[in-house]
Image (cartoon, rainbow, N blue to C red):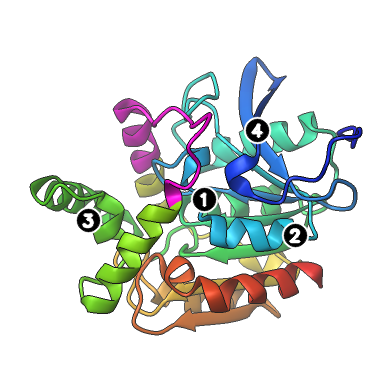
Amino acid sequence: MSNPGNDSVITSYADAPTKTVTAGGTTYAYRELGPKGGIPVVFFVHLAATLDNWDPRIIDPVARNRHVITFDQPGVGASTGQVPGSIEEMADDAYTFIRALGFDTVDVFSFSLGGMIAQDLALKHPGLVRRLVLTGTGPRGGKDMDKVVGITYFDILRAALTRSDPKEFLFFNRNATGKHAAKAFIRRLQERTMDRDKPISTAAFQTQLKAIQKFGRSAPADLSKLTQPTLIANGDNDRMVPSILSEELHRRIKGSELVIYPDSGHGGIFQHHAAFAPAAVDFLAG
């Protein structure tokens, strides 16, 4: 367990220092904030993302009363090592990281690719995960999930042509509401000015994409084995991981809660952060 020490509690993600822990030959970069003690909330980030890709409007409210940990998977950002070729191996790495910090029970907050990793982690180590938040994600073998590769490359091209961030296209609707929400989200990601993470390499990003494609084409997992309280959330128009897959997760994970936000896409939880963050805080307090 980390030593609380005498350091004052950091509750703003923009101020959380980047730390490292080494396990299994990999040095993991991570940040932590919020009051130490109790069960931490470990955040599993999306495709191509580093420590700098978490929306402070989601992280900060959770960190008011909870110990929050974000981390870079091997081969991503400031973590050493290579990105593995499968989601299952990514889940093994996440387990290694969590155990290296000395925790045997955590809550997991996941988004997109992070949600795929979180499912595999919870299935393999059911005693480790107490509560599970799955946002903008879908199940192993989910219909059309393997199309994410084509959609992603198409939107990266569209973004390059308009000199925008690809997330503006991938995460948000291209209507007035969506465009406004996209710009606001990208601005929030720039609020941290010091000690920023290293962007993901193209090779690492491509390996992650292939792993998602493989996950989408795999035989479904038995999600009835997930017995922990689970909150599922998405926008109603997710082009990356079709919104219908959130409904499928809800059907297959007994007792799960489902929230679908209107007029929003893959980044629905970021567009609707004012409603979603308190809902997530309440759920995690459980």
The numbered mark, 2 or 3, whose residue comes first in the sequence reads: 2
Q: Label 3 belongs to which residue?
A: 151
Marks 2,3: beta carbons within 8 A: no
Amino acid type, residue under disc 3 in the picture? Ile
The numbered mark, 3 or 4, whose residue comes first in the sequence reads: 4
Q: Position of residue 112 (x, y in %)?
A: 46, 56
Q: Position of residue 243 (x, y in %)?
A: 39, 74
The numbered mark, 2 or 4, whose residue comes first in the sequence reads: 4
Q: Label 2 belongs to which residue?
A: 64
Local crowd size for mark 3, using a 10 Å CA cut-off: few (<14), some (14–19), many (≥20): some
Whole-Å distance between the Cαs marked 1 and 3?
22 Å
Spot the residue most to the top. 25
Residue visible at 46% across and 72% down?
A: 234
Secondary element at tag 4: loop
Q: Position of residue 206 (x, y in %)?
A: 31, 35
Looking at the rendering, the stretch of residues picked out in magenta corresponds to 189-210
Spot the residue most to the left. 161
Secondary element at tag 3: helix
The numbered mark, 1 or 3, whose residue comes first in the sequence reads: 1
The numbered mark, 4 or 1, whose residue comes first in the sequence reads: 4
Q: Position of residue 4 (x, y in %)?
A: 89, 37
Q: Is residue 67 left or right of residue 203?
A: right
Q: Which mark is residue 54?
A: 1
